[in-house]
Image: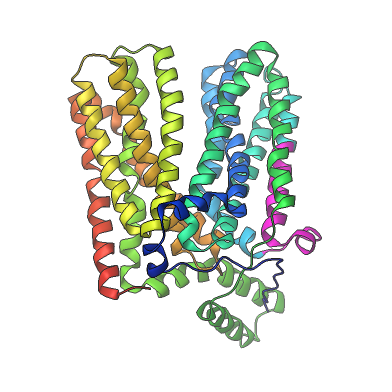
Amino acid sequence: MHRWSWTTTWKPEPALNEATTAGMTWGEAFRVYTRPRVVAMLFLGFSAGLPFLLVFSTLSAWLADADIQRSVIGFFSWVGITYSIKVLWAPVVDRVPLPGLTRWLGRRRSWLLLAQLGIAAGLLAMSMTDPATETVQLALLALLVAFSSATQDITIDAYRIEAMDRQYQGAMAASYILGYRLALLTAGAGALYIAEFGSWPLSYLCMAALMGVGIATTFVITEPLRTTPRDAYLSEQRVVDFMARSAHLPDRYRALVAWFIGAVVCPFTDFFSRNGSVALVILLFIAVYRVSDITMGVMANPFYIDHGFSKAEIASVSKVFGFFMSILGAMIGGVLVVRFGILRPLLLGAVLVATTNLLFAWLAVSEADLNLLAMVISADNLSGGIAGSAFIAYLSSLTSSAYTATQYALFSSLMTLPGKFIGGFSGVVVQAQGYPIFFIYAAAAGIPAIVLVLFLMRRRQAAGPD
């Protein structure tokens, strides 16, 4: 039935344990960012972040500039659903080889190249489409870009987890976030500048060309070594044996069902079998960890405007201070994971995110002061960066190497859905109670994450070192 066949030109980094991280100096911890595969994540992060705004806010600006009806512009946002349901085709990315490409590049790089070519082709075609007369065609091309982008995300996440030991995942995440943020600036402000002084078709043509960064990186990096845990292999083998005994079924049907169970069902049963009774607690923790910052983020810009800050002030402070502080926070988070493991930085991030929401409550009852705004936004982005790196490292540590793409796609979908749902009520709270109470409410939304990470830390201590 299914057999793993992987080739590689390098071996994974030696694993770090509690003893090695405890004796590691801060200089050695920071030097993790010079490792070639950590550097590669910078360029892969850029490739991942570039298409995101080009099918969202940047595309909305183009449509508005073309005088498209606002209701139609709203419908375009539906292409973003692909990012939330990517878990549906993650098993295909995880398990199905691409004819010709996989033999040449390997499983991860072949899917990565296909997705990047899909993004570049979609952006190129969008640059040759007139929104006023070819609106439906533009929507379909945006859907192609979003689907290819979500597929690229699945593959990059799997590559990142498989390329380095889990103690390096914080640094890998920080490097990825830096690249992603640079791409957001490029696809946001950069695309708008090109459109302003050139044209929208030229802007999207330039963005399509910039996908060459990701394509070139795919050819430079090497395929990660992938191993299949013994339990996962036996689990699949039992499925094969069971289907082999179903002689009354057609062979093709048995093979299809066996593949489906191995690719779709086994990733979930593997997670629950490895984590036992605490599996549901872990899933709950994943669901609530980002609720606080997502809830606050929904009403951030309306608050700035209502509090009396100009759009130029908001843009300058949030873009300049926000960008650099989020990158600094991500890098600090990566170093903390290398130095202290995952759970302690995870706790620090949860506490800081909730606390910075209280700073927004302070800002809400204060006069509109630009220096105070800069301080609060800086603290918010710094804490978000630390929490983001630690959380990505934690999610990466939960995956099995047999089902990397599928399991991480599940986690990444789960981590945003509750926050987005609860965030939908943010305006109701603001309208009924005002901004100070809302920010206190957003801070309180972070308490469950703090409690659950403390529980996981106590359980880890009780279980002893890995």
Q: Is residue 106 magenta?
A: yes
Q: Nearer the viewer, residue 93 or 24?
A: 24
Query: Where is residue 67 drawn, in percent x and y?
Result: 60, 12
Q: Which residues are magenta?
A: 96-120
In the displayed structure image, the side of residue 66 where residue 429 appears, left or right: left
The N terminus: image quadrant = bottom right
Q: Nearer the viewer, residue 73 or 165?
A: 165
Specify the quadrant of the image occupied by residue 149. Answer: top right
Color encoding of the figure: rainbow
Magenta-highlighted stretch: main secondary structure? helix
| Relative to 434, residue 224 above or below | below
Residue at (51, 21) in percent of width and height: 71
In the displayed structure image, the side of residue 161 where residue 343 appears, left or right: left
Q: Nearer the viewer, residue 276 or 44?
A: 44
| Relative to 319, residue 218 above or below | below
Query: Where is residue 92 drawn, in percent x and y?
Result: 63, 60
Tell me, yes or no, if residue 290 can be seen here.
yes
The C terminus: image quadrant = bottom left
Residue at (52, 18) in percent of width and height: 70
Tell me, yes or no, if residue 429 can be seen here.
no
Query: Where is residue 249 drawn, in percent x and y?
Result: 65, 80
